[in-house]
């Protein structure tokens, strides 16, 4: 295998959280007087850290979101996760294959550590991710499309960027991986292929991923 480390995005790649969180984000922003559709939320915020939501709203309206915005939003999201969240179809099989083959992997997410852990506990993916395999934009201060998170994950895992491949489903995540000097495989389940055109490779179902990795 060409790569020494597989870096997974979390939301939309491992856990099927994007429809839930974008539905709730659009609803909450609209409730606060910033009309936002589900499609708007996916377009503008999918794959990003929470600071991007604050920054874009203030840039577009001149108004700041409430100080408790993140806490209220995450409370709603975590409650919905407990009711609805599932692993992405095929993600467990990918992790089983990587573990059986002894391939190093980790997760690097724009979401908070709490969000990652809540999602993993709810879906049973926590068995695959010890603390040392989990990295959040909280660790670096800047979320995607900045490359900081992926570079930090690679450094902590002891692997050079050129030996890493990132698995992403958002344009912001693909931009971050490219900026980090890493190959990136774009998952087209929720995002049209043309919006992930800068990815090294594209795939439509996680079942394709182990085969793609073995070809390198």
Image (cartoon, rainbow, N blue to C red):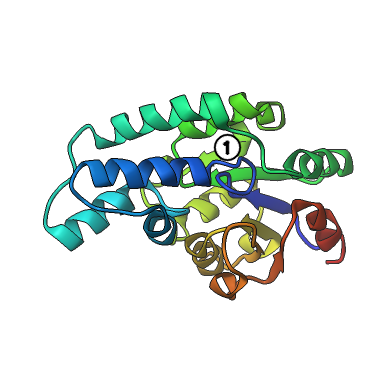
Q: Secondary structure at mark 1?
A: strand
In terms of image quadrants, where is residue 128?
Answer: top right
Question: Which corner quadrant holds the N terminus?
Answer: bottom right
The relative height of residue 106 versus residue 114 in the rendered view (above or below) is below
Task: State the residue at coordinates (33%, 34%).
Answer: 73
- Whether residue 1 is visible to the viewer of this picture, yes or no, is no
**Left or right: where 61 falls relative to 208:** left
Task: State the residue at coordinates (55%, 45%).
Answer: 11
Which residue carries the number 1 mark?
134
In this rendering, the count of numbered labels is 1
Question: Which corner quadrant holds the C terminus?
Answer: bottom right
Residue 45: image location, x then y, percent = 39, 55
- Whether residue 107 is visible to the viewer of this picture, yes or no, is yes
**Left or right: where 17 falls relative to 57:** right
Residue 177: image location, x then y, percent = 55, 63
Task: State the residue at coordinates (65%, 27%).
Answer: 126
């Amino acid at each position: 295998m060409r790569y020494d480390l597989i870096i997974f995005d979390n939301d939309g790649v491992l856990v099927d959280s994007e429809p839930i969180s974008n539905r709730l984000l659009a609803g909450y922003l609209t409730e606060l007087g910033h009309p936002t559709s589900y499609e708007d939320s996916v377009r503008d915020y999918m794959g990003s850290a929470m600071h991007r939501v604050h920054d874009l709203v203030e840039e577009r309206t001149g108004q700041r979101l409430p100080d408790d915005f993140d806490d209220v939003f995450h409370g709603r999201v975590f409650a919905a996760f407990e009711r609805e969240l599932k692993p992405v179809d095929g993600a467990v099989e990918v992790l089983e294959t990587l573990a059986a083959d002894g391939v190093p992997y980790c997760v690097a997410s724009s979401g908070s550590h709490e969000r990652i852990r809540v999602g993993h506990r709810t879906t049973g993916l926590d068995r695959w991710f010890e603390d040392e395999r989990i990295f959040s934009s909280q660790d670096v201060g800047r979320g995607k499309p900045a490359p900081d998170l992926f570079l930090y994950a690679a450094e902590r895992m002891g692997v050079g960027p050129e030996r890493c491949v990132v698995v992403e489903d958002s344009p912001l995540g693909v931009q971050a991986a490219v900026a980090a000097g890493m190959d990136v495989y774009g998952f087209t389940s929720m995002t049209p292929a043309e919006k992930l055109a800068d990815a090294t490779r594209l795939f439509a179902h996680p079942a394709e991923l182990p085969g793609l990795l073995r070809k390198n």
